Structures are given as structure tokens and as C-alpha cells.
Image (cartoon, rainbow, N blue to C red):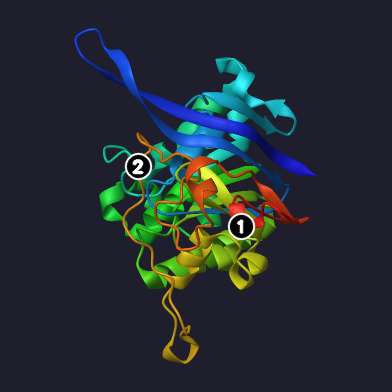
Amino acid sequence: MNILEVKNVSKHFPIKRGLFRKSSETVQAVRNVSFRIGNGESYGVVGESGSGKTTLARVVLRLIDPTAGDILFEGVNLAQLASEPLRQLRRDMQMIFQDPHSSLNPRKKILQSVGEPLVIHEGMRGNAMNRRVRELLEVVGLKKEHMYRFPHELSGGQKQRVGIARALALNPKMLILDEPTSALDVSVQALTLNFLETLQEKFSLTYMFISHNLAVIRYVCARVAVMYLGRIVEEAAVDTLFDTPAHPYTKSLLSAVPLPESQQKDEELLLEGDIPSPLNIPPGCCFHTRCPEKVGDICHQVDPETIRLSPTHTTACHRYTDR
């Protein structure tokens, strides 16, 4: 059973210029994205910086409104919900942000930061809130005394655990994790990932895991989507994607992963240039300006459709159009 279904979602940001603030250009941050996440599943979204991963996460949570498309959470279309029903439903979907320090108010003690959703949604205060915050901190491996500290008095790993405790306060069904380990030391990253797996089993959580770190995605996720310029260009089970990637962009990402000398590949696939601006997306296939496997003029002129290579593997590439 799917807990989340995203259908043809797009998000465009108009750029306003001039005295009368007219929209002259549009940033196409997310373009016609569709995917499903099963109940209790870990689903990964990977891609370069600027590919639209974080914008997609914020649209899924309705922190920003989609330009087009539907977002079905347990059958309810979040894209059409008014503010109050959305606020009630949001307790079931929480987000853990990339930078654990900037996501916490430096002027508030941990007790206030973790207890804030309890105050807003449950009206909980006083001793009841203190007890609940203490329980949440114990769940994430922190002690009672951490309740009375400010964020600057905690390490990066401890602040990330505070963010997790705050996300768990309302017993959500799904967590969206935006690069949750990128700001942490390597040794702390492994501990955090293991801890997240333990939490998932304990509380039957569903994860949407956003990262540019392919090793993290392979360790945590069951399925993965690869984004480029706001579009999903490949989606597959994680072992399928790593062992038999189909899209040239996916191949280049995997080629860039450092390996021990004994496992070095015979040939590396290096891309030329940088990712184009979402203000000026190339015509045809958006990847053709950097693609080493172009098949002709069609790549320059026609945006490829998503092709199903197997029941669990799709890609958007003209090389597979005739299948």
C-alpha cells in the first residue's frame, strides 16, 4: 500500500523585475515529477546541487504550493487542502533539515524547541510537556540535562538528534530527511544512519531520503529516483540502479563515486560543463548538453518520455525509445 503518491508535480518560481514587478522569467525547479512511496519504505532522491531535490521535498509537505500536480498522502490530496485541514494532517508528515544548527532557534533551549509542536498541535504545557520532551530525548539517545541547554552547547550530532526528536514529537507516519548527515563528521554520519534505521523499525516510519551521497542512499534506501534539472530521469530498486544503471547521467554519478584501488573501474565517465540554469533549460532532453551518449538530433529536439525497462525500473532516455 502506498502512503504517498506524487502525480505530475511541477513547481515554477516567477522572477519579478522592474518598477511594476512584472514576471519576466521563470525558474522551473521541479518539472512533471511522479513517484510512489510504499508504507514503511525508504525511498531515496539523489542528484547534483540544483537538481530540485529540496524544492520537491518542500512541495510534498506543502511548505510551498505546487504550480501543478497532485500530492496524495493516504489518499488525501494535499495540493487541494485548505490551511486548517493541512495543518492537522501535517502532524503525520515531518521534515528533518539539512543543517541541524540553523534549524534550531539559537535563543531557545532544547526544551522549547522540541516542545514547540506539542504546544501548537496538542496544547501541551508545563509538567506534561517536560515529561514528553524528556521521553523524546531519551528515544534519540540524549539525557535529561540536554533539555536545558542552548543549541550552541551541543555537538553537531546532538543537534541532529534534537531535530529528530522534534520531528517524532507528534508520532508521524512519514519523515522527509533532507541531507540529514551532510553537515556531520564521517564517524557521526554512520551512527546517525544506523540510528535512523533503528527508529524506522521501532516506530514503523516511512522515509523519503534526499541526498547527493550515493553511498548513503545505497545503505539506507530500497528504491531510488535520480533527479536532473527538476526531472526524474531514472527510478529503480537500489541494487538495480547501482548494478545496471540505464541513464547516462546515472552512470556518470556512479562513476564519480571513489572506490578502493582494487575496485577501480576500467573507464570513468566524466561529464563536461556544469548543470544548466533552471532559468534556461535546454530544448529536447535537458541532459543533452553534457551527455556522452547522444543518439542524434532527437536528443536536441524532443523531450524523452519515461520508458519502463522492467516493472520496477524506468528511465527518460531516447536510447530506449524503441523498446
- Check disc 2 and report the residue beneath it: 104
Q: Residue at the top extreme?
A: 20
Q: How many marks?
A: 2
- Label 2 crowd (10 A; few <14 / some 14-19 / many >=20): many
* SS of the residue under disc 1: helix
Of residue 45 and residue 142, the one placed in the foreground of this image is 45
Q: CA distance from mark 2 to mark 1?
A: 47 Å
**Which of the pair 221/67 is nearer the observer?**
67
Point out the image quarter for the C terminus.
bottom right
What residue is shown at x 45% (from left), y 51% (from top)? 288
Q: In the image, what residue occupies the spot 48% across and 83% down? A: 265
Residue 25, image x, y percentages = 33, 24
Secondary structure beneath disc 2?
loop
- At 43% from the left and 66% from the top, the residue drawn is 189
Q: Position of residue 6 (x, y in %)?
A: 65, 36
Against 1, residue 254 (above or below) is: below
* Type of amino acid at the residue the image marks with label 1: Arg
Quadrant of the rendered structure where residue 2 is?
top right
First-in-chain label (2 vs 1): 2
User: Can residue 2 be seen here?
Assistant: yes
Location of mark 1 (residue): 319
Provide residue 45's location: percent of width, then percent of height: 54, 52
Q: Amino acid at mark 2?
A: Leu
Residue plotted at (63% across, 43% down): 305
